[in-house]
Image: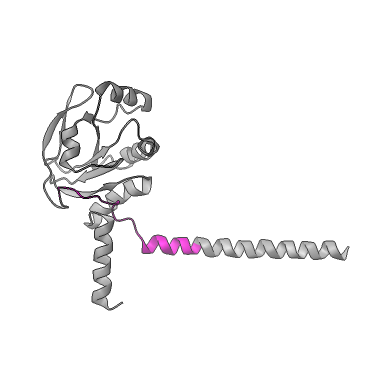
Amino acid sequence: MSFLIASQVLLWAAVLVLGVVCIALARQVGVLHQRIAPAGALSLRQPLKIGDPVPQLSLPGLDGTTVQVGGVRGGRSQLVLFLSPDCAVCEALLPSLRSAHGAEKNWLDIVLASDGEGDKHEAFVRKQGLSRFPYVVSEQLGRSYGVSKLPYAVLINEAGKLSATGLVNTREHLESLFVAQERGVGSIQQFLKLRGQKRASSGE
């Protein structure tokens, strides 16, 4: 009997310790989230710099309409997401893209872009239900932004200038581009550089 009582006491002690550990971990995650705020996805080498006017292009969309990429857009920004039907990460990102389309619709237009065979992309659009998005197939557009890995996003502000860009493997990466434009920081590299300069100037 005493053995069972001792076992119960040890079990409850273990549960309490586990609870304390979980609370401590949750607090630490919160601290890390505050210290490392989203500030633009990882940016690759590209021909355009943050703040540069982007090329204004009129491209044929899959549905036969003309899609305007770049240029002044009357107070609206434009997100160009480069993806591929063969990219598993791209496909996994689509629910986040749909969510962003609804949440940011008051200020943001979204264009999907790729290259290759048009028939393959038309099948991809039908399968994934992407008909609500303008979709262009243009190798020229990808070269304009130096896209070499997918999925890759380019955020163009209302003045037609590049405001944020980078690889977007997750919802957090995608949303970080919006935060980057809001804060005037184009990529995670730039954010870390500015933070380092700020710490150096304050003597931390």
Snapshot quadrant of residue 139: top left
- Relative placement, left or right, of 123 versus 5 is left
The structure residue drawn at horizontal position 29% and vertical position 36%, both measured from the top left corner, is 83
Seen from this angle, which residue lies furthest bottom? 203
| In the image, residue 36 lies in the stretch drawn in magenta | yes
Residue 179 sits above or below residue 67 on the image: below
| In the image, residue 47 lies in the stretch drawn in magenta | yes
The structure residue drawn at horizontal position 52% and vertical position 62%, both measured from the top left corner, is 25
- Relative placement, left or right, of 128 versus 14 is left
Indicate the position of residue 46 as horizontal and vertical percent values.
18, 48
Indicate the position of residue 172 as horizontal and vertical percent values.
37, 49
Residue nearest the observer in this picture, 146 or 184: 146
Q: How many marks can you see?
A: 0
Snapshot quadrant of residue 147: top left
Indicate the position of residue 35 as horizontal and vertical percent values.
37, 64
Residue 175 sits above or below residue 22 on the image: above
Query: What is the basis of the colouring in this image?
Result: one colour
Indicate the position of residue 7 as horizontal and vertical percent values.
79, 62
Quadrant (top left/top right/bottom left/bottom right) for the C terminus: bottom left
Quadrant (top left/top right/bottom left/bottom right) for the N terminus: bottom right
Magenta segment range?
27-48
Snapshot quadrant of residue 107: top left
